[in-house]
Amino acid sequence: MNAKVSAFRAGDEVVLAEGTYQGTPGVFLRLTDDANWAEITERNGIVRSHPLVWLAHPHRSDTTGA
């Protein structure tokens, strides 16, 4: 049995950096049985699966200019 390795841990804040829903924030839950996919909880509470390569840690910046 191969161990699944990920740059993300359960509870990490993530953002979809690629794909149709680019910019969507969420919380990393787990890798799926296919280690190329991960489940995240999006801000609306829905759990969805996305390709792992689409996920990124959010950039922390105070330069929003708001």
Image (cartoon, rainbow, N blue to C red):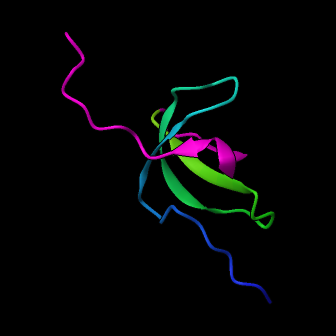
Residue drawn at 63 percent across, 53 percent down: 39
For the view shown, which residue lies furthest in the top direction?
66
Residue drawn at 51 percent across, 26 percent down: 23
Residue drawn at 72 percent across, 46 percent down: 51
Q: Is residue 45 magenta?
A: yes
In the rendering, at what x and y percent does residue 60 appear? 28, 38
Q: Of 65 and 50, which appears nearest the observer?
A: 65
In this rendering, is residue 45 above or below 6? above
Query: Which quadrant is the C terminus positioned in?
Result: top left
Residue drawn at 50 percent across, 61 percent down: 8
Span of residues in magenta: 44-66
In the rendering, at what x and y percent does residue 20 appear? 69, 23
In this rendering, is residue 22 above or below 43? above
Q: Is residue 29 magenta?
A: no
In this rendering, is residue 15 above or below 10? above
In the rendering, at what x and y percent does residue 26 appear? 47, 41
